[in-house]
Amino acid sequence: MSMVDEPLYPIAVLIDELKNDDIQLRLNSIRKLSTIARALGEERTRKELIPFLSENNDDDDEVLLAMAEELGVFIPYVGGLEYAHVLLPPLETLCTVEETCVRDKAVESLCRIGSQMRETDLVDWFIPLVKRLAAGEWFTARVSACGLFHIAYPSASEMLKAELRTIYSHLCQDDMPMVRRSASTNLGKFAATVEPAHLKTEIMQIFEDLTQDDQDSVRLLAVEGCAALGKLLEPQDCIAHILPVIVIFSQDKSWRVRYMVANQLYELCEAVGPEPTKTDLVPAYVRLLRDNEAEVRIAAAGKVTKFSRILSPELAVQHILPCVKELSSDSSQHVRSALASVIMGMAPVLGKDSTIDQLLPIFLSLLKDEFPDVRLNIISKLDQVNQVIGIDLLSQSLLPAIVELAEDRHWRVRLAIIEYIPLLASQLGVGFFDDKLGALCMQWLQDKVYSIREAAANNLKRLAEEFGPDWAMQHIVPQVLEMVNNPHYLYRMTILSAISLLAPVMGSEITCSKLLPVVVTLAKDRVANIRFNVAKVLQSFIPIVDQSVMEKTVRPCLVELAEDPDVDVRYFSKQALEAIDQVMMST
C-alpha cells in the first residue's frame, strides 16, 4: 500500500465499523465521526455521511446518544454556517426516538446549531422542522418540539410568530401529559423571546391553563415557570398574575407541587419583590414549614436562612422562629438534618440578642440530636454563630457539646469534629485550646477507626502550622513520640504517619534531633508493614534533613532495610535509596 493511502485506511475501517454488528465498535466509530468527516472532506460529508446517518436511526440508544452529541458540533465539517441546515434531518429523526436522553441531546444539539444559523436559513429550514415536529403523530416528536421554539421564534416574520405562538398554545393543551410537561418546562425560555404585548396576553393565558392542569406533574413544572415569568413581567403584572398562583400552589392538593414551591420559594420571592413577600408569602411559607408531608418540610426547612434574609429581623423572629423551634424537634430526622444545615446562617440575620435568647437553645438541642447527620450539620457551620455571639459565650455553651461529640459512637461525627478542630483552634486561641481540646487531639491518634487516626495525624500538622513549631515542640511532639511504643502495630503506623506530616512543619533541626531517631528505631520493628513505612518516611525526610545526616543516619538505615527478608520492605527501601542518589547527583 502506498504512503498516500495509509491515512485513509483507518478511515475505511471506521466507516465499516459504523455498520458493524458489535455495538462497541459502532460506538467507537460514532465518537470519531469528526475524524471520518475530515478525511471525507466537506462535500462528501454532506452528500454521503450525513444521509447515511439519517437512515441509520434504529440503532442502540447509546449509539444514537453519541450521534446526537457529535452532530451538535459538526458545522465546521459540512462547510460552515452556509451548509448548517444539512445537519437538521438526522437530528430531526433523533428527536422522535423513544429514549428520553437521546431526544434531549438531539434537542440540545439542534439548539446549538440553530443559535448559529443565519436568519434566512432559520426561516427556510429550522422553523419548518419545528412545525413538523410539533405536528408529529407520535408524542415524542411533540415533546422535542417544545424545546426548540425559543430558537425559532426571534427570526420569524410577524405572521410566522403568530403561528408559532398558536402552535405552542396547542402543545400546552396536548392530550399527552408528557407533551404538556415539556411545554411547561420550556415556557420560560420561550416567553423570554416573546414581545411584551403578547407576553401579557397569550403567554400568560397559556401559563394560567398550565397552572390548572389536572396532572400534578404538569403543575409542579409550572411552579418553575412562576419564577421565570416573574423576571420578565413588570412588578405590578407580577403581583397581579404570579403572586396568586404561588399562594394557590402552596396549598395544592399534591404534596409534590407544594414541595416544588418550597424548593423554589426564594426565587419566587425575588420575582414578586420584598413587599408582597412580607404580606402574602410569609403566611404561605409558614404553612409549608408546618406541612403534613415531611418532604415538603425538608424543602422548606432548607430555605429558612435565605427566606429570613429577605425579611426584617422582627418579622423573622415573629413568624419564622416559632416554626424553627417546632422543626428542631420534628419527628423526621431528615427535616431536623435539613434545618441543622442552614440554621446557623440565621444568627447574622437575627443579631446577637435574638441569637443568644432564641437560637442558641435550638443549636444545643440539635447538637444533642440522636441522629448523627443533624449533629454534623450543626458542627460544620459553627463559625457563623461565633461571628455573632463571640467566642466566650460560644465556648461556655457549645464546648461541652463539642467534647461530648468528640467521643461520639458514630465515627463520622468524630471525623467531622476533627476536621473542624483547626478552625476552632484559630478562633479559640492557643490558651483555650491547650486547656480544653489538646488531650482530645492525642486521644484520636488511638481511635479504633483508621479514617479517624489518619484525620487526627493531619489535624496535628494543621495545628502545628496554626500555632507554630515552638508550640508544637512543647505540646505535640513529646506526646506523639511517647506513643511510639504502643503494643498495637496499627497505632505505631499512625505515629509514623504523624511524624512524616509534622517533619516539614517542624523544620530540619527538630526533625534531625527528635523525629529521625524515633523513625530509625522503628526500622527494627518486628512488623514488616512498619518497616516499609519507615522506608517511605525516610524518603519523605530527604528534602528536610542535611546531607551529612542523610549519609550518616538515613542511608545506613535504608541499606540495612534493603536486605530485609520481606519483599515490600526491600522494594520501598530501594526506592528511597534511588531517591537519595538522584538528590546527590543533582547537587
Image: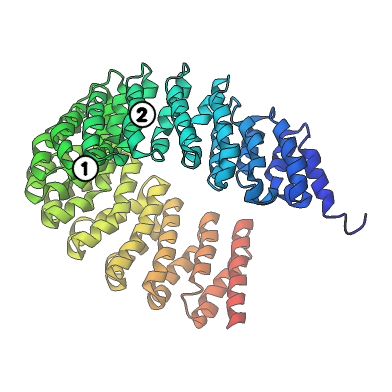
Quarter occupied by residue 209: top left
Q: Residues within 10 Å of mark 2 (few under 14, many from 20)?
A: some
User: Which residue is label 1 attached to?
Assistant: 305
Q: Secondary structure at mark 1?
A: helix
> In the visual, does 197 lie left or right of 36?
left
Is the N terminus in the top left, top right, bottom left or bottom right quadrant? bottom right
Is the C terminus in the top left, top right, bottom left or bottom right quadrant? bottom right
Quarter occupied by residue 428: bottom left
User: Which residue is label 2 attached to?
Assistant: 202
> In the visual, does 564 lie left or right of 3?
left
Specify the amino acid type for callout 1: Thr
Q: Residue 148: x percent and y percent?
A: 51, 35
> In the visual, does 242 lie left or right of 177?
left
Q: Secondary structure at mark 2?
A: helix
Applied colour scheme: rainbow
**Which residue shows up at 21% across the image and 34% down it?**
239
Q: Nearer the viewer, residue 398 or 275?
A: 275
**Which residue shows up at 28% across the image and 42% down it?**
377
Kindly report the distance in space between the C-alpha atoms of the residues bearing marks 1 and 2: 37 Å
In the rendered image, the vertical position of residue 295 relative to residue 558, given as above or below: above
Q: Residues within 10 Å of mark 1 (few under 14, many from 20)?
A: many
Specify the amino acid type for callout 2: Glu
In the rendered image, the vertical position of residue 265 relative to residue 545, given as above or below: above
Q: Is residue 367 visible?
A: no
Q: Nearer the viewer, residue 297 or 365?
A: 297
Q: Residue 83: x percent and y percent?
A: 66, 46
